Image: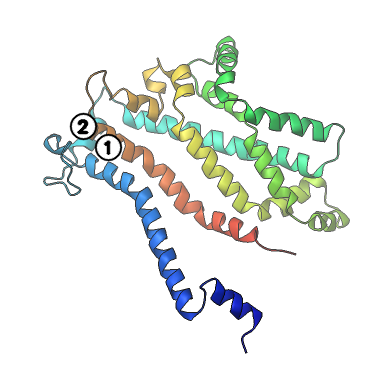
Amino acid sequence: MNTESDKVEKGMGFGIGGGLLYRIMMYVLLILFALFFLLPLVWMVVTAIKPFEEWLMPNWIPIHPTLDNFRSILDDPTLPVGRWFLNSLIIAVIFTVSILIIDSLAGYAYARLEFKGRNLLFGLLLATLVMPGIMFLIPNFITIARLGWIGTFQGVIVPGLSGVFGVFFMRQFFLSIPKELEEAAYIEGASEFRAFISIVLPLSQGALATLAIITFLDSWNSFLWPLLVVGNVREMQTLPVGLATLQGQYTFDYGKLMAGAVIMTLPVMVLFLLLQRYIIQSIAMTGLKG
C-alpha cells in the first residue's frame, strides 16, 4: 500500500522513472544556464588572443593565436595599465574593508541596540534606497571639490561609504542569529562590543563574504564617479576609466579592449573563488531552523 508521500511524489513525477527524468532535465537546464553566462567570457578571451586580421571573424578558435594585444597595452608607455590596475585595486580594497567595518557596526546597532528613534532612523535609511544614485552626484562632487579632494583616492572612496544596502543586509543577517548566544556572553561578563567581536562576527563570515564580493565588484567596475574625480589625472585613473581611452570616436581596438577586459576580470574571479565557500555556507545556514 502506497503512503501519502509516495502518492504525492508520483503525482509530481518524482517516482523512480520520474525522478531520473527530473534530474536529467535539471542538469540540462543548469548546463544551459552555465553556457549562457560563460560564453561572453570565452568570447572575450578568444578575441583578446586574436590577431588584428581575425577580429571580425566569427571563429571561436583563433587561427593564429597571439599575446600581442596584451603586450601592446602592457608595454605602451602612454597606457599605464599597471598603474591603473594598482589604483583600482587600492581603491576597491580600502572601500571594501571600510564598508565591512562601518556596515557591520551599524547593522549590529540597528539589530540589537535599543535607542530612541531607532526604527524611524532605519526607515529613513531604507527610504534612500529608492532614490537613484545620480541624485547625489553633484552634491558629492561639490563637497569633495571644496575639501580639495579632486584627483585623490579619498575623493573616490569616501562618498561611497554612506551606502545603505550593506547596513540593511547586515542588520537582517544579525537578526537571524539567536540572541541567547550574546546573552550567555553577557552573563560571563563580556561587553556588547566583545560579544559582537567574539560571537556575532565569527557567525557572520558568509554574510561578510557576500557583502565583500558585492562591494568589491561595485567599486572595481565603477566608472562615472572615478571619471569625474580623477578623469583628468592620467596617473590616478582607475582601470575602467583608463581602458575607455582605448575606444576612439570612430575606431575600436577590439583586441586591446578585450585584453584589458581580461585583466580587469581576473581579480573579481579570484576573489569569488576565495570566498565562495563562505557564501555557500551562508546560504546553507539560512535554511536551518532552531
Locate the C terminus by quadrant: bottom right
Q: How many marks?
A: 2
60 or 281: nearer the eye? Answer: 60
Q: Quarter-wise, where is residue 178 in the image?
A: bottom right
Q: Name the residue under label 2.
A: 72
Residue at coordinates 81% horizontally, 35% vertically from top-left? Answer: 119
Q: Percent from the top left, x then y, of residue 186?
A: 85, 53
- In the image: residue 73, left or right of residue 87: left
Marks 2 and 1 close (CB-CB < 8 Å): yes
Q: Name the residue under label 1.
A: 259
Foreground mark, 2 or 1, reads 1
Amino acid type of the residue that numbered disc 2 sits on in the rendered structure: Ser
Residue at coordinates 74% horizontally, 29% vertically from top-left? Answer: 124
68 or 17: nearer the eye? Answer: 17
**136 shown above or below 179:** above
Amino acid type of the residue that numbered disc 1 sits on in the rendered structure: Ala
**19 shown above or below 88:** below
Residue at coordinates 60% horizontally, 74% vertically from top-left? Answer: 8
Neighbour tally class for label 1: few under 14, some 14-19, many 20 plus, Cα within 10 Å: many
Q: Percent from the top left, x then y, of residue 116?
A: 87, 32
Q: Percent from the top left, x then y, of residue 277?
A: 52, 58
Q: Is mark 1 on a helix, strand or loop?
A: helix
**190 shown above or below 247:** below
Q: Which of the marked residues, 2 or 1, is nearer the chain's N terminus?
A: 2
Q: Is mark 2 on a helix, strand or loop?
A: helix
45 or 77: nearer the eye? Answer: 45
